[in-house]
Image (tube, helix red, strand yellow):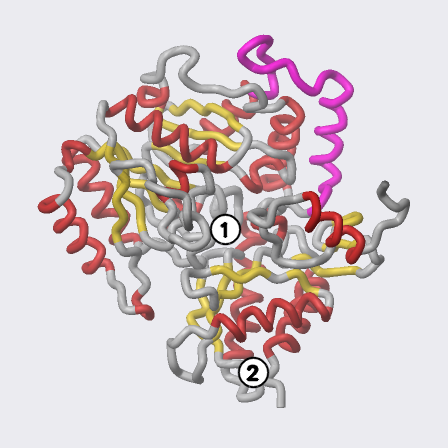
Amino acid sequence: MSSPNPSNADLLARRTAAVPRGVAHATAIYADRADNALLWDVDGRRYIDFAGGIAVLNTGHRHPRVMAAAAAQMERFTHSAFQVAAYEPYVALAERLNALAPFSGPAKTVFFTTGAEAVENAVKIARVATGRSGVIAFTGAFHGRTLLTSALTGKVNPYKKDAGPMPPEVWHLPFPIPHHGTTVADALKALDYLFRADVGPERIAAFILEPVQGEGGFNPAPPELLRELRRLCDAHGILLIADEVQAGFGRTGRMFGIEHTGVEPDLVTIAKSLAGGFPLSGVIGRAAIMDTVAPGGMGGTYGGNPVACAAALAVLDVIQDDGLLARADALGGRIKARLETLRNRNDILPIGAIRGPGAMVAFEIFKERGGVDPDPDATRQVTARALELGLILLSCGVHGNVIRILAPLTIPDAQLDAGLNILAQALAVTR
């Protein structure tokens, strides 16, 4: 029997007994309530949230307009299955996203529930549209934890560990990270080798990549890489999939991260901050490509839930009406300026490689000042110390040494500065 007022310790014990260990968690706190950029745990402690539910809360916890839209829809109905009795919020949201699509020409949108579903369906659409089966992804990529999306993800541990053979006809190229020794030329040379040794371009349905890698370390895809991929796609009939699950909906200062490059994709996967905390994902694509899948070939019982669609329409209104694209740039500039100040301090752990467009900002912790040798142990200590001081902070990166900042775009400046002050304390060299 559960206690009426469980503590973090109570819930951790219950979680250990009831929930598989494969569902990891970054902290040992249990949320009780939240508002915009603040979260309170069941023990009554308040935290500034620099995680945003892993990039889900660009419009903050419980934005009033989002909550009002969801509540209004809940008064009407919560589910009918779009495939059984369709509804206007789904259609209206598709219309809005089609108008925002980061490519020219007519667009269509289909909705699902999770980011992994969106990626799986984007690959399915690409295969149907091209009649081909091969997919090329990148090292360090994260596309989900289902079997196909694990295959696309460019990291073995923990996503592929002990899971047996991955789905076939998925290849990886090195993702360019110059300060870790990998350039665009290296990636393109590897692609040339791949086309010569393993698979011809005529068998490739799609390239898939994140315009800014998420779990891989907030590494922006170089525009020259995307331009060359676009050229190859046009030359060989390959489709380009932009995975915008983490970078989309204003985080980078544009509605979609790929808009920074000037390169147009063919398919775009979306989720996370689309619906302000309600589960919703989708694929936006060129209309002719999207219509190649036969009726019944896409969908899902909960896909495009009406409450989530209503919330997403409100999210789009908030992004537009509150100027959150410009706000992302302003926040990012403020964060990066503070990080540069910290980087030059001798009483702070060695940090560097400060990067990211808009408010999708990250930096790395190194073992030596001026070096590039990753220090994952120190990184874990920093996130733990930040939590003790009242800041929810996440790490990422293929070496586990990247700190990412995902504060809501609606965070007040005073709370942002307070969070950055805690970050500075967490980064302080212990003597």
- Residue 14: give x, y in percent of width and height: 75, 48
Q: Residue at x 25, y 44 (%)?
A: 171
Which of the marked residues, 2 or 1, is nearer the chain's N terminus? 1
Residue range (magenta): 61-90
SS category of the residue bearing label 2: loop
Rendered image: mark on residue 70: none
Q: Residue at x 42, y 50 (%)?
A: 161
Q: Of the residues tagged 2 and 1, which is closer to the observer? A: 2
- Residue 15: give x, y in percent of width and height: 71, 48
Count neighbours of disc 1 (C-alpha within 10 A) and say few if under 14, some if 14 to 19, many if 20 or more. many
- Residue 33: give x, y in percent of width and height: 79, 48
Image check: 424 left or right of 270? right
Q: Is residue 82 magenta?
A: yes
Find the distance from the CA under tag 2 to the CA under tag 1.
29 Å
Q: Quadrant of the C terminus?
A: bottom right
Rendered image: mark on residue 253: 1
Outermost residue to the left: 196
Outermost residue to the bottom: 431
Q: Amino acid at mark 2?
A: Ile
Check disc 2 and report the residue beneath it: 348
Q: Amino acid at mark 1?
A: Gly
Vertical placement of residue 429 versus 233, above or below: below
Callout 2 touching callout 1 (CB < 8 Å): no
Image check: 306 left or right of 336? right
Vertical placement of residue 201 versus 194, above or below: above
